[in-house]
Image (cartoon, rainbow, N blue to C red):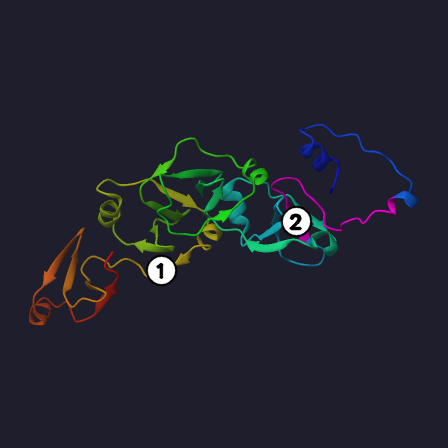
Amino acid sequence: LYDEAVAAELNGGSVPYAAVMAPAQLRAFTVDSRMTFRAGQLVSASGAPEVYLAMRDGRLLHVPSWDLIRDVGLSRTKLTVPTSALNGYSRGTLGAVLDCGGTVYIPSGSGVSPIAPSNPTGVVPTELDRATCGMLRTEEVAVTGEIFVRIVGDERVLHLSGGLARHVPRAVQVRAIAGGSYPAVHGLRAGTVSTFTMGRPYAAVGTLVRASGTTEVWLVDGDRLLHLPTWDMAADFGLGRTVAVESAA
C-alpha cells in the first residue's frame, strides 16, 4: 500500500493494526512491487510524462487531458512513483463517457450526470471500478434524450450520436434533433471535448444532401428537407451541384 491513508481507506476509515516483523522474517515472503493507491488517485512513473488514473482492479487509465479530470470532478493531485510500483497494471484510456456498475455518466463540468434510460451517445464508455465511482460527485437528476455538448466559451453545439461528435450549425436543427424543444447543452472544457471522435458537421441550412444508397437530393430548409426534382431547378436557384451524403438515419 502506498501509505497509511490507503490502508485506512481499505479498512473502513481507520488506520489498521499492522504487525511488525524482523527483516529475516520478511524475506520469507514474496513482496509484490506493484503499489495500491487511494481511490481516484492520479499517478506517474518517475521520469515519464504520462499520467494515469489508478484502478483498484489492476488497471491504469491514461488521462488524455487535465480538462477531463476537472470536468468529472476528480482531484488533480498526482503522485510520482518508481516505475516498478506500476508493474503488473494493465493499460487503458480514460474517456469522457463513464460506466459505474451499469449506469452511464457524462461529465457535468465539476462532476458527472447519469444518462437515462440508455446511452444515446453511441460512445463506448470507460468502465470504472467501484472505489473510483465512489469518488465522483454525481448529479441526482438523469439527463434524458439526445446528448449535446459544447466547449466552454464556444457557442457551437455538438451532438453526440453513433460514437461521434457532430457540429449542428443552426439552433432550429438542434431543436429538431432534440424532438422539438431546445435541449440542455453541457459546457465542457476543450480537452474533454477533444476525447470524442469528431464526425462531419450536420448539413447546413441551404445546402443539398442525399441519403447514402439513394439518389433523391434534398435542400436543407431549417428542420425540413425539400425534395429537389431536377438539377435545372438547382441551377435556376443558384444552388450548385455539391451534395453531402449522409446516413439514412
Relative horizontal placement of residue 182, taking residue 13 as reference (left or right)? left
User: Quick check: can you spot residue 107?
Assistant: no
- What residue lies at 31% left-to-right and 59% top-to-bottom? 201
Closer to us: 173 or 100: 100
Q: Is residue 139 magenta?
A: no
Say which element carries label 1: loop
Query: Which of the two residues, 204 or 163, is positioned nearer the viewer here?
Result: 163
Real-space CA distance between mark 1 and mark 2, rounded to the nearest whole angstrom: 32 Å
Q: Is residue 81 visible?
A: yes
Query: Which quadrant holds residue 62?
Result: bottom right
Whole-percent x, y for residue 142 in the image: 38, 35
Check contact, mark 1 vs mark 2: CB within 8 A: no
Q: Which residues are magenta?
A: 26-44
Nearest the viewer among 26 and 237 is 26
Examine the image and state in which quarter residue 15 appears: top right
Type of amino acid under label 2: Val
Q: Which mark is residue 207?
A: none
Q: Provide residue 158's location: percent of width, then percent of height.
A: 34, 51
- Across and down, in percent, residue 82 comes to 74, 53
Which residue appears at 39% of the width and 59% of the height?
198
Disc 2 crowd rating (10 Å Cα; few below 14, some 14-19, many 20+) is: many
Q: Amino acid at mark 1?
A: Gly
**177 left or right, relative to 33:** left
Secondary structure that dominates the magenta span: loop
Which residue corresponds to mark 1?
199
Q: Is residue 43 magenta?
A: yes
Look at 91% across and 40% down and name the residue there. 22
Q: Which residue is mark 2?
A: 43
